Amino acid sequence: MSDSATAKVLVSELLGSCPAPFAGYDRVLLGHGSGGRLSADLVSRLFLPALGNEVLNRLEDQASCVLPGLESARLAITTDSFVVRPIFFPGGDIGRLAVHGTVNDLAVGGATPLFLAAAFILEEGLPLDDLRRIAESMQAAAAEAGVTVVAGDTKVVDRGKGDQIFITTTGIGLIPHGRALSVASARPGDRVVVSGTIGDHGMAIMSVREGLEFETALESDTAALNGLTELMLRSCDGIRAMRDPTRGGVSSALNEIAAASGVGVELVERALPLRDSVKAACEILGLDPLYVANEGKLIAIVAAAQADDLVSAMRTHPLGRDAAVIGAVVAEHRGTVVMKSVAGGSRIVPMLAGEQLPRIC
Amino acid sequence: MKFLDEFRDGAAVDKLVRAIRNRVTRPWTIMEVCGGQTHTIVKYGIDEILPEAIELVHGPGCPVCVTPLEVLDRAHAIASRPDVIFCSFGDMLRVPGSRGDLLQLKSQGADVRVVYSPLDAVQIAATNPAREVVFFAIGFETTAPANAMAVALAARRGLTNFSVLVSHVLVPPAIAAILDAPDNRVQAFLGPGHVCTVVGFEEYEPLVARFRVPIVITGFEPVDMLEGILRTVEQLEAGEARLENQYGRVVTRAGNTASVALIADVFEVCDRKWRGVGSIPGSGWRLRDKYRAFDAEERFSVQAIDTEESSICISGLILRGQKKPHDCPAFGTICTPETPLGATMVSAEGACAAYFAYGRLKAAHAGAV
């Protein structure tokens, strides 16, 4: 490899964060919650050595376990915590998000979501009206998604020891017999499909925080995907894996698939569905939409021959109207995601190191 | 999106690449000055679509990478104080000084905040009168107007709890230093579009005349970069050396005169150390005497912190192309991206960090297969 090619590898690895060396930290940083490489490190170097087992080690979005006496289906379990600020944002609130996030983690594993448990950590002083709005919003979201909140817990912490409200939801669903989706099952030749425009949720939150206003308001895409995933799995038997690209964005989801399956992924920049307002906000803030969170989108890996039919089927669903093939799985550059740019060159799309920080230059 | 899509258009890119191919008869080495231009090259894979005869060399225009070690250590010392709210542009937080980076300091309880504009830091000072608010005022000519405005505004509002840690650097003296080096390989420059948006391009005319080197002030989108490259190649092939302005849609000869006046009111030229390069005469700005009250180095008495770069480190020789990273005894042993001794290991564009990362990536691939 030439000097410029080696430089390119590294610059790509760190793109968006200038010199950013990846340091060995001895305390938790915000970046450990970014869904990027620091998060992955925390899981693989700290949690798995302590807690790892055959099911947990698979690192799917949901665990799937065989229940003794139940042969017709496997049990799917997942849990997720929600710490968004502001708690009410354009397109949703922390309650809707807490239902959708967990429902989606079940749905992308091919499960039918059934039950949720919700735990609330409340900061002293939170207006009860806000809490009521959030609870009602959760109920509405659960009803739309066809799940029932069957258990819960509440704790209150001193003022200043929390940030208004944190919600953890745990979801239980059933995976029908015969469905075996896994991030480890992508094969060279498969196509990469996204269900719609990327970066909407993260940029809606950022624009509220930074006080940015656009001609068309940015709205979170938060939505329950189980209706869409059911439709997809019924209309197509060539789906190998699905992921909902939340924190860390499309890049993290695809890097995880590439690593788990031992394949390369090739994206086509031109094919990425992107709202103009999201693109503009990303340009202004110096962020890359591939790393921005989504809360109502999924990535699917599908056999090439069925990709077009799958996209057509997805487009009949309201949450899949902008579905598109955005790339392919390849045998080259295993474990690495590469994107063909609009200018015709290519670049490595690495996992984000820590938080995405705005650049000066 | 207007003003973006037409400058990322595939057909326009193809046409320019063909024009460059048709014009090139022999190898040329061109330096893009700005870190932002380097990002565009990597992000769009511009180097892949150019003819092999064109070698692009990454310039010194990444303000984060050239900020000297002692300034990072001074920032660390100030931000460690419990009475201080330390505000900075985002990507400075991850740059390690000899005492660690600002993100680590934040996790240990320091009040370190990312702001998009230095004016936000002034506002934080106004709303927190009991705290000292310090802004890390780094960057090239591009960030200078907002940094100067923050100081002028704080003065006008009579804020006594606001100060700035200044480490401003200037492009023209750096270009002169590169061209003055006896073993210089750079034959033409893509000039810094955004720097010139602020200060204009008059200062580049003497460089073109003195060194007989083509400089094309260039923008940051793929079409801008390729047009800049085409124009430098046309000059090189014709044996000419002129100053051209490719980025005419925002750059004028005199620049933004209101900004220039504001900068002149707040800052004055000084000698400045560049990480990995050393001191370059007249290559920086510092606060003028009348704004000394806003100088964080004086307010917190950190001028004495004067960290030397490692004596083992050969990054200066590597930057000039005289040595390779493997020639250094510290490479990959005591000097890694986590514990860098010099700029070439700190900066993403640095040769040492690139060699190190490539080795790591290769090992990771071998493991995955």
Image: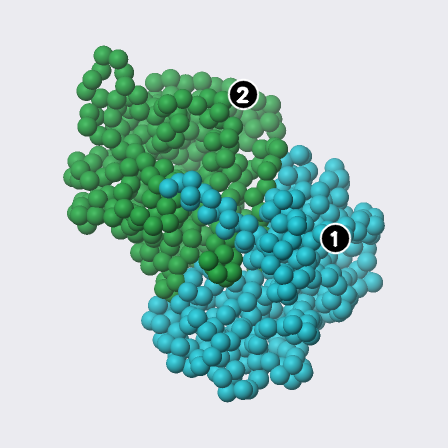
> Relative to residue B133, is residue B331 drawn left or right?
left
Give the number of the mark in front: 2 or 1: 1
Q: Which residue is mark 1?
A: B311
Chain A visual colour: green
Which chain comes out cyan in the rendered image? B
Expressed as whole percent of the image width and height from the top left, the position of residue B139 reads: 65, 60
Quadrant, the C terminus of chain A? bottom right
Query: Where does the image place residue A46, in percent across and percent down from the top left?
Result: 52, 28
Chain name for mark 1: B
In the image, B117: left or right of B310?
left
Residue at the image position 55 percent from the left and 67 percent from the top: B57
- Going by the numbered disc 1, the residue's amino acid type is Ser
Cα–Cα gap, marks 2 and 1: 55 Å
Residue B110 sits above or below residue B220 on the image: above
User: Which residue: 42% across, 29% down?
Assistant: A80
Residue position marked by numbered label 2 in the rendering: A156
